[in-house]
Image (tube, grey):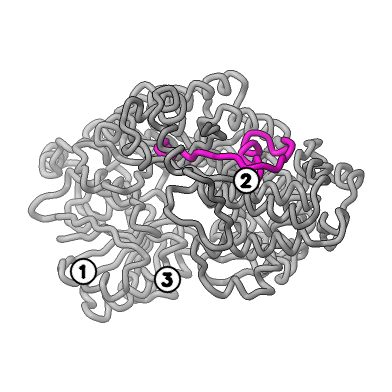
Amino acid sequence: MKVLLTTLNSKFIHTNLAIRYIREYSRYLEGEKYSVLMKEYTINNSIDFIMKDIYKNNVDLIVFSVYIWNVEDVMRICENIKKINPNIEIALGGPEVTYDVEDSMKKHKYIDYIFYGEGEVVYRDFILYKMNKIAEVDNLHKIDETIETDNLNKIGETFEIDNSYKIDEILHKENEVYKPTDISKIRGIAYRDRYGNTVINDPMPLIDNLDEIPSPYENIDISEYENKIVYFESSRGCPFNCQYCLSSAIQGLRYFSVERIKRDLKNLIDARVSQIKFIDRTFNANKKIAKEIMNFLMENDNGYTTYHFEVTAHLIDDDMLKFLEKCKVGLFQFEIGVQSTNKKTLMEVGRIDDFKRLSEVVTKVSSYKNIHQHLDLIAGLPYEDYNRFSESFDDVFSLGIECVQLGFLKMIKGTGIRNNSEKHGYVYKNYPPYEVLYNKYMNYEEILKLKDIEEILEMYYNSGNFNLSVPYIIENYFERPFLFFEDFSRYFDEKGYFDVAHGKNRLYEILLEYASSIIKKNNLESKKVKSDKHYDKDEYYSNNENGIEIEWIFNNRNRSLDNYGKEEEYEIFREILKLDYLSLGKTSSLPPFFDRIDEYDYKNRCHNFLKKLENQERYTPNHYNEPAKNIIKYVHFELFKYNVGSLKKDRKTEIKKGNNTIMFYYDIDKIFDKSNIYEISLD
């Protein structure tokens, strides 16, 4: 029997952990009578390409790992494969089919089996059944204590999950126990009986000792992970019960042993994979384990591999903060789910959080300048209307972290919020990803406005291409960050800019056009753009139940701007935008909407500056004592009309008119900035 274990990843750089675990758990069975082919495709591959590749491999059974992003393509492939060869059996597993097994079997007649719940043991038992060498499943592996059998201890000791065992050896040792059985004995499987009716067997108990799962990281084929993200889990489950998350459907939290975790990580580190992404829902749920793992990663840093964790910030105590301060720059990345800062909303969805503590932790970590932080918000949660969501947005944006992810509630199968959708009047798409259309608190038009804001946020903030210009325009011309994104997205929409793709230069030009329209308003009050529902200062803070003082929102205008007219204000912003543009990388020319200042003998003066060893030591340390003609490859000199480089350190610094030179140095680790900038003198 030849089996294909496969899936469709959302991107080429992704890898699927589930099919690797399933392969390893049953690897000892592989031989003449059972062979496995493991292949990964992406949702960007054409259906015809995938079908052709599957057909050429001439397999007997196809097992797909199914998720919210690939279920529609998987179903199309399965339906057509079955038309081509009705004798091929098809099995599905994964979260997208686990929580509506009966409906999936009824709707998709071309599916023969569904493995629901954790798949390792289910798949192993099914293969034994298919090989006609399966024992009584209840005696084949350790099960929960509610099941009593005289043979439990005997079989549990005999049938260890070890690749060195051969099934024939086990059968010969235990002939008196092992005997043929039928599919009805396999837990965690749905199938069709001889009349075509769907039969759903009892669920498979969760694997209590995760170390029983053989590691997929032994004897690594480096090419398998080349230019890929490796997904890694140190635990399964979550200590929280968030009703919008699939993890809430499974109670409890189980860990692999720390020894096993370290051994697997060391194998990956030695293989020099580029990034390891921990898929633990709350990596730091156990502080001791989290700290031990992170310390191990620091001690075994290979100078290449980086690590991504989903953490709960309010669980990070002062001791952990001191530990994190010592981390190498860029080694770790944190993803932190905020979702909302509305306490009523969080209570309704069963989320435990402390935004005041979260803010303290995020701000402290930001001050270390060594860990990239990514904070998540979800639009469409209960009791949060458009205006209250804008406050959540401001609360998070004001923390000044590197990335703010604005997502939209997905009514995922098996979650509490979907099961109780009528309570809050949810209307959502009935196809993946089941995104909310509207509810009692937010109408569809407001959802669409937030969609536009999300796009602006990605282009003009999360991209890291406007690190000075966007905060500058917010602080000087808007009362709150959300109002900038709301107003700019409205401008984008009115101009039809959402309808076409834009290159880098055009994005800068559009922001310059928009800034001009804002700056040219007649007075400060009109410049401070208002929302449809205006919050004055007292009202805002009375509504802000978290008690967090928002840095951005009030009285943040750079007072030195009052010394300039609106034309000069526009010139200042254009120079700031030019600074952002040149910070991205070396360029031989500037777009025509930027002014370039020429001075006599400027290039020669820049060249002489690079010749001086004291300048090399201070500004270009990676190229100390090298010829200037080599160093020039990594630097750029530009004249500016104002001292805008000073705003990089302090956006409240007094803005002064007068030509000054800024040197951009690009040969750096581009973790937080894409260049270092220095205000220098060429005299």
Q: Secondary structure beneath disc 1?
A: helix
Q: Does the magenta-highlighted stretch encompass residue 560?
A: no
First to last magenta residue range: 641-669
* Sequence-first disc among 2 and 3: 3
Residue located farthest toward the left when viewing the structure as drawn: 32
Q: Which of 239 and 569 lies nearest the eye of the viewer?
A: 569
Q: Residue 615: x percent and y percent?
A: 44, 26
The disc placed on residue 72 is 3
224 sits left or right of 593 in the view: left
Point out the tag, 1 or 3, that comes first from the N-terminus.
1
> Which of the pair 120/18 is nearer the observer?
18
Residue 64 rendering spot, x and y as whole percentages: 32, 61
* Mark closer to the chain start, 2 or 1: 1
Kindly identify the amino acid type of the residue bearing the numbered disc 2.
Answer: Leu
Question: Whole-Å distance between the Cαs marked 2 and 1?
Answer: 49 Å
Quickly name the residue at label 1. 53
- Disc 2 vs disc 3: which is toward the camera? 2
Residue 468: mark in rendering: 2
Amino acid at dot 1: Asp
Give above or below for 489 relative to 327.
below
Q: Dividing the picture into quarters, in which one does residue 352 lie?
A: top right
Q: Which sits in the foreground, 356 or 131?
A: 356
Q: Residues within 10 Å of mark 1 (few under 14, many from 20)?
A: few
Query: Could you give the CA–CA distance between mark 2 and mark 3, rounded to whole angstroms?
Result: 42 Å
